[in-house]
Image (cartoon, rainbow, N blue to C red):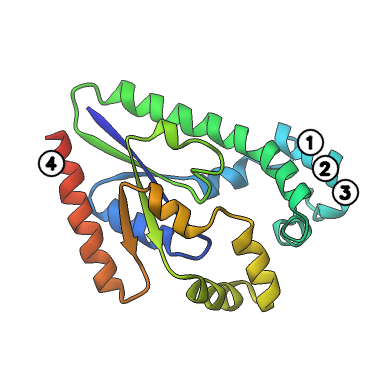
Amino acid sequence: MALIIGLTGGIVSGKSTVALMFKDLGAKIVDADKLGHSVILPHEPAWEKIVKIFGKDVLQNDLTIDREKLGKIVFANQSLLKKLNDITHPEITKIIKKEIDSLKNKTYNQKKILIIDAALIYEAKIDRLMDKIIVVYIDEDEQIKRLIKRNNLSKDEALQRIKSQMPMKEKVKMADYVIDNSNSLDKTKKQVEKIWKNLVSSIS
């Protein structure tokens, strides 16, 4: 039996770090962010639609989409963000479904845990594909600080990006497990190990 786990959280909450911890324990990880990059490669269906809506100004010389430029446009305009999500989410969901089907087919009678690392599990309505959901949590002040530092944004720009996602508190309410990633990595790791034991025992 394979267990499908959704791993989500807010922007810069540390999902990727937590995903690596689960990988070290033996989980197979599907990184939706990387899938998001692959669906917008030149001449893919999503790329064609993005160029049609946003114009060639969002392209770099090699025809790849300038994600930083596109980010600045959509995070300043909720209706354009919705248009972009409407283009990319179905394509990413298709690949995630394929990964889930492939795991379920391959691991007949095997105990496997597949973790889908995706920021927009609830927003893209793919939570129904998961057996359990883990939310990686940090408070909004910490989010703002991390985002300003990581993306070199103003406080207003950081807030725009945070507000473009479902509020972290809403995600926490809907989660099966919550990992508080506000403290040391060691504390985060202990929470990951505890959840892992729980997941493993549920399929043993």
Residue indicated by mark 1: 48
The disc, 4 or 3, on the residue closer to the chain's N-terminal end is 3
Position in image of residue 171 (x %, y %): 44, 52
Instruction: Name which quarter of the figure residue 186 lies in.
Output: bottom left
Circles 1, 4 touching at the beta carbon (< 8 Å) = no
CB atoms of marks 3 and 2 within 8 Å: yes
Nearest the camera: 95 or 184?
184
Question: Which residue occupies 54% across, 33% down?
Answer: 93
Provide the secondary structure element on which disc 1 rests: helix
Question: N-terminal of the two: label 4 or label 2?
Answer: 2
Mark nearer the N terminus (3 vs 1): 1
Amino acid type assigned to the residue bearing label 2 in the image: Val
How packed mark 3 is, by other alpha carbons closer than 10 Å (few <14, some 14-19, many 20 or more), is: few
**Quarter of image, res 5:** top left
Question: Which residue bears the numbered disc 4?
Answer: 201
Mark 3 lies on a secondary structure that is: helix
Tag count: 4
**Amino acid at the residue labelled 4:** Ser
Distance of label 1 from label 2 (alpha carbons): 5 Å
Of mark 1 and mark 4, the one earlier in the sequence is: 1
| Quarter of the N terminus within the rendering | top left
Q: Looking at this view, is 179 or 42 the one in front?
A: 179
| Alpha carbon distance from label 1 to label 4 | 46 Å
* Residues at marks 3 and 1, CA–CA distance in whole angstroms: 10 Å
Which numbered mark, 1 or 4, is in the foreground of this view? 4
